[in-house]
Amino acid sequence: MNEDLDFESLRTGAGIFEVLSKAKALERSGKTILHFEIGQPDFPTPTHVKEAAKQALDENFTGYVPAAGILELRNALQNEIELTRGFKPTLEQILITPGANPGIYFTLRAIVTKSSDEVIFSDPSFPTYGAVLNYLGCTKKAIPLKEENKFRLDPVDIETNITKNTKVVILNSPMNPTGSVMKTDEINKVAELAEEYNFVILTDEIYSKMTYDQEFHSPSIRDEAKERTVILDGFSKAYNMTGWRLGYAIAPENIIDRMSLLISTTVSCVNSFSQKAAVTALTGPQTDLRNNMQAFRKRRDAIVEGLNTIPGFSCLTPQGAFYAFPNIRETGMSSKELADFLLSEAGVACLPGTIFGSNGEGYLRFSYATDVTNINQAVTQIKNALA
Ligand SMILES: Cc1ncc(COP(=O)(O)O)c(C=O)c1O
């Protein structure tokens, strides 16, 4: 393993916050910035969810709770997983985490033990994957995503990269940063490969409730997360709860046991009253989620249409999450040059695709968690700046 840890290798995960702080600095100097950089819904946490947390506080539900999470939430998740993934996990397969992001670290830390252990993931992908793999010092195998394949990870490419050392394959569908959603048969094929070659699928399903035209599908249906599937999901995106730090893992009991030890050693347990609110998020009305997804669909249509009118830009229609990933090669600028230019000259903050891996060169990522007026305004400002 990595004996001489290079902390710089972790900075890949921090690129997003660097852009955010540059944008904030410009705002402090008096400039108006339209924000498309951070992956956080702009809607408030639903009122009934906030009320549940307030009630828990009033009832003094403020102490330590079990490292695996409160029973009430784990019970609610048994029903949630049965409804959304088609099987009912045992309580021992469920772990509450302080967000899906630390769940990525805990999962990989629990499975990957040697520097020769290989983990397959995509390029581009959510930066935490690469950063954690760097930190663990294991062998990274990044598969370039192809725009011709609508940025879906191709099971054929996965199979080509499998060796006897392959321990984990990371899936993220719907995906950050491309908004792509893998097809059911593609996901099932990866689940078959996992069985054949005996690796674990880490399936990051944080956008599972955020699809448009294509249905969400989880590879966990094949083994019911009993042998080789780890589901990571959470409350940040679907319930507008990014700051609450709430997520969960559904995994084989032996992996949950290890992850739970890591939780109790590092964070002790996840915030008690947040967990009460999470029960209400899952079991209460889902009206906010439905309304938000309707708004996101309009925003998606507006941003895709708008970006496609900018000379040098071409943008596919994302099928899930709230990210657009336009190809900007014909502008003649690199992703970083263009993102910097748009921030300083157009007052539009977005991310260079390279934050998500070297294969993100030639693309920008726009998080369309902002209303249609801002989207249209941003498109106009980009056009003017480039003209
Ligand atoms: C693919 C993916 N996984 C995990 C996370 C982190 O989610 P959480 O807020 O639950 O830690 C994000 C957040 O942007 C994400 O895009």
Image (cartoon, rainbow, N blue to C red):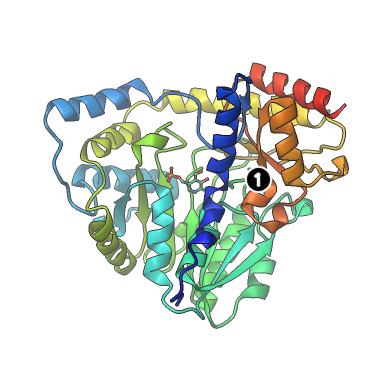
Camera-side residue of 349 and 294 = 349
Instruction: Relative to 126, say whether 259 is above or below.
Output: below
The answer to whether any part of residue 86 appears in the image is: no
Question: Which residue is at the far left?
Answer: 60
Residue at image coords 77%, 31%: 307
Instruction: Relative to 162, say whether 9 is above or below.
Output: above
Q: Check disc 1 and report its element: helix, strand or loop.
A: loop
Instruction: Relative to 87, say whether 254 is above or below.
Output: below
Residue 289, percent across and down? 46, 28
Q: Identify the residue position indicated by label 1 in the image.
A: 178
Residue at image coords 65%, 20%: 374
Residue at image coords 53%, 52%: 13
Residue at image coords 67%, 53%: 152
Q: Is mark 1 within 8 Å of ligand 1?
A: no
The answer to whether any part of residue 13 appears in the image is: yes
Residue 123, percent across and down? 65, 58
Location of the C terminus (image quadrant): top right
Instruction: Relative to 48, say whether 76 is above or below.
Output: below
The picture quadrant where one finds residue 335 is top right
> Could you tell whether 42 is left or right of 63 in the image?
right
Residue 196, percent across and down? 54, 77
Three-letter code for the amino acid on which mark 1 is drawn? Thr
Question: Which residue is at the far bottom?
Answer: 164
Camera-side residue of 227 and 267 = 267
Residue 201, percent across and down? 49, 64
